[in-house]
Amino acid sequence: QEALSAGGDCLLAGDACSADEACSPRLRTLRQCVAGDGSVKLGPGARSHCTNAVSALLSSPLRGCQCRRGMKKEKNCLSIYWSLYQSGMHGEEDSYPYEAVQKGYDYVRLASIAADSDVGMMTVNRCLDAAKACNVDDLCQRLRTDYVSACIKPSSKSGLCNRAKCNKALRRFFDRVPPEFTHELLFCPCSDMACSERRRQTIVPSCSYEAGEKPGCLALTKTCRDDYVCRSRLRQFQYDCEADEGSASGCKQGSHAYCLLAYTGLIGGPVTPNYVDNSTSNVSPWCTCVTSGNQREQFQCLGVRNLYLCSTDYRRAERNGASINCLHMALP
């Protein structure tokens, strides 16, 4: 296998490193360094061992490697990425777990899905059109049927749905079906409560995330960060959806469509967001800040509220007289 250049696929870079006599022991040392008991295994010279391993790996294919959302063995790839990240090899500020999405879809049209949500709503039922379009596409129809079936089927033991199976099927749907189908289903505009409720039910909330009692948002975020995939999806969301009122797209990174992709990446994980009412811009994960005890915790929890989806094309909004706001992922 040929050596990869820096910045490639972490799985392939990891395989190349493991097959190399000089690189393999350094990667093994690095993993011990970031493990909870790594210093015990490495002995009194742990800090020096770790520093030397990182220095040596800086010139290996692992430096700057990334993963692809929905790839085979995604979790394995991300485990390598985060080992490197925790060691400081990737750098704190510009580290980004996923490769940039290739523009294979109609991103101009995608970027307008949530932006002009009021335009033509009374004459065209885009939610109904989205459902019809999915039904005539083999992949969309099959994977949508799969997740709906997984999310509504009761377990023979408990009588409840299998949440893990439901969320796995949801992630498969949003990772594999082209966004011109998934985004139309998820971000179609509604003008009445019946339509809004059908749209809210798109991801079968009763099985995918709702529970008897809402967890605290800080606890939910910790659960997410303890999981390689969720942590990576959340980081992608924070990167692609950082708001910037000076940008034409409303997003600091300049792409509203990438933000929508990052949003769908959170579905099927611990911080799954969904609509809380009939507003296109009012979405939230299933959690609360009420349980945050002291003032510092309350402040941290409310800080989690500052997650934005840059969903408004500002120029389009100005032309149509719409309010110029980013879709705010507000926590209750």
Image: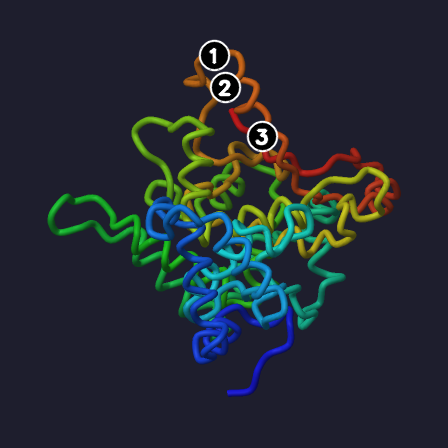
Q: Earlier in the sequence, mark 3 or mark 2?
A: 2
Quick one: label 3 or label 1, which is nearer the N terminus? 1
Vertical placement of residue 276 versus 137, above or below: above
Q: Nearer the viewer, residue 76 or 324?
A: 76
- Residue 165 point in image, percent of width and height: 30, 56
Q: Nearer the viewer, residue 66 or 201?
A: 66
Q: Who is closer to the viewer here, 215 or 191?
A: 215
Camera-nearest residue between 102 and 222: 222
Label 1 crowd (10 A; few <14 / some 14-19 / many >=20): few
CA separation, marks 3 and 1? 21 Å
Q: Classify mark 3: residues with Cα within 10 Å, few (<14), some (14-19) or many (20+).
A: some
Judged left or right of residue 138, residue 157 is: left
- Residue identified by numbered label 2: 297
Question: The residue under label 1 is which amino acid type?
Answer: Asn
Q: What amino acid does circle 2 point to?
A: Glu
Label 3–label 2 contact, CB within 8 A: no
Going 48% across and 71% down the picture, which residue do you hit?
14
Answer few, some or many: residues within 10 Å of disc 2's Cα (few below 14, many 20 plus, some between 14 and 19).
some
Counting from the top left corner in percent of width and height, residue 330 is at 58, 30
Label 2 SS: helix
Contact between labelled residues 1 and 3, with CB atoms less than 8 Å apart: no
Q: Is residue 222 visible?
A: yes
Q: Which mark is residue 330?
A: 3
